[in-house]
Image (cartoon, rainbow, N blue to C red):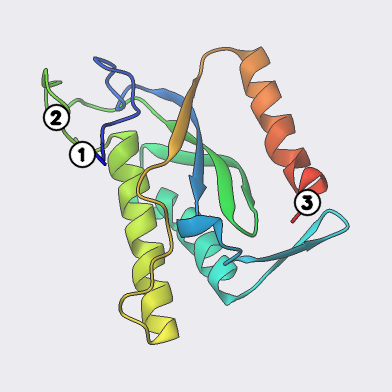
Amino acid sequence: MIFRNTSRRLTRYDYRNPGAYFVTVKTNGNRDLFGYIHEGIIFLNGRGRVVLDEWKRITNVRDNVRCAEFVIMPDHIHGVIEILPYRLIQPLEPDFRLLGGSLGAIMGQFKSRVTKRIRNESGNPHFTVWQTNYYDHIIRSSNDRERVRRYIQQNPMRFHP
């Protein structure tokens, strides 16, 4: 069996570009790690509160990033990250690299911080929180943004374990 770990990102698209990005990150093995949902209401456990704290922290660490719509589900998260205009420091390389200020760098740091905190709090240095990759969608219009907002907002009511 051959395993591929290729990027799911658009080729030749600079993910440092200003804009809104819809992201979905799943837990490793799709395990319910962050709490539970009852009648459309999310009840976060300690791990879920770590995720919430670190999501809010993204804007404290990066002054050109805003976190918009967001929901924590038992086994995944959905959110919108807005990258604001800033001075480009590195030119776009022709091959795939994780560049500072890119969506990949933002998500990588977020996932890493959540994992480190959960590992510290659980006392298990090998605990795996996230799947390796994440899904992203570049939001290109106000209609698309409204569709994403509704999807995120209604996600807990559609959740069935």
Q: Is residue 48 visible?
A: yes
Image-based side of 78 in relation to 3, left or right: right
Determine the residue positioned at 62% across, 22% down: 145
Measuring from the top left, give residue 16's x and y in whole percent. 29, 27
Determine the residue positioned at 43% across, 83% down: 121
| Disc 3 + disc 1, Cβ < 8 Å | no
Vertical order, 106 against 116 (above or below)? above
| Real-space CA distance between mark 2 and mark 1, rounded to the nearest whole angstrom | 8 Å
Q: Is residue 62 visible?
A: no
Q: Residues within 10 Å of mark 2 (few under 14, many from 20)?
A: few
The type of residue carrying mark 1 is Gly
| Real-space CA distance between mark 3 and mark 1, rounded to the nearest whole angstrom | 37 Å
Image-based side of 21 in relation to 5, left or right: right
* Residue to which mark 1 is pinned: 100
* Element class at badge 2: loop
Which residue is at the far right?
39
* Residue to which mark 3 is pinned: 160
* Element class at badge 3: loop
